[in-house]
Amino acid sequence: MPLTDTLSFFYPYDLRAHYDLDYLIEKHMPLVKERWAPCGMKAWSVTKFTPNPEGIPPVYAFTTTLSWDRHESIGTALEGKDVNAIMDDVTKFSNKEPLIIVGECIGRDGED
C-alpha cells in the first residue's frame, strides 16, 4: 500500500513565462483544496526550483504537488464537475502549460 498518492504539475522554466506565485499560493491552491478535498485530496505543496550549484537553471520553474488518500481519488477529481473551474483558474497565475505527473510514494523518512 502506498504511503500517499500524488498529482504533480511541473511548470517549465522559460524566460517568456509569466508566473504569479503569490496568486498561486494565496488563491489557486486554496481553491483546489476547497474543491478537491471532498474527493480525497489531503494536502498540497508548492516547490520553487533554483539553479543547481553550478548555476545551471532548472528545467522546471516550480511544481505544485497534491497528496491524496488513495489513487482512485485522483481520477474522481479529474473527472469531476470542478476540474474545469480549477484548470480555468491556472491562466491567472501561468501562461505556460504544466507537465502533469501522477505518482505513488513508496518510501519516506521524517515528518509527514
Image (cartoon, rainbow, N blue to C red):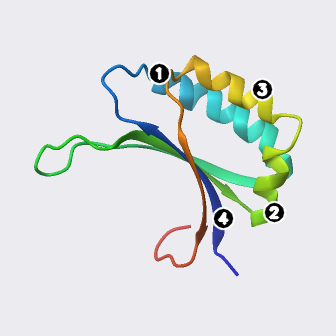
Q: Position of residue 100 (x, y in %)?
A: 58, 47
Q: Secondary structure at mark 4?
A: strand
Mark before the other along the chain sequence, 4 or 3: 4
Q: What residue is disc 4 on?
A: 5
Mark before the other along the chain sequence, 4 or 2: 4
Is disc 1 surrounded by few (<14), some (14 to 19) or many (20+) residues within 10 Å?
Answer: few
Dot 1 and dot 3 residues touching (CB under 8 Å): no
Q: Residue at x 44, y 23 (%)?
A: 19
The amino acid sitting under disc 1 is Asp
Q: What residue is disc 1 on?
A: 20
The amino acid sitting under disc 4 is Asp
Q: Residue at x 14, y 52 (%)?
A: 53
Q: What residue is disc 2 on?
A: 72
Dot 4 and dot 2 residues touching (CB under 8 Å): no
Mark 1 to mark 2 CA distance (whole Å) = 31 Å
The amino acid sitting under disc 2 is Glu
Mark 4 to mark 1 CA distance (whole Å) = 27 Å
The amino acid sitting under disc 3 is Ala
Of badges 1 and 2, the one in the foreground is 2
Q: Is residue 40 visible?
A: no
Mark 4 to mark 3 CA distance (whole Å) = 23 Å
Looking at the picture, tell me which residue is in the foreground, 72 or 23.
72
Which quarter of the image is occupied by the C terminus?
A: bottom right
Q: Residue at x 42, y 19 (%)?
A: 18
Tag of residue 85: 3
Q: Position of residue 30 (x, y in %)?
A: 68, 34
**Left or right, residue 88 beside residue 19:** right
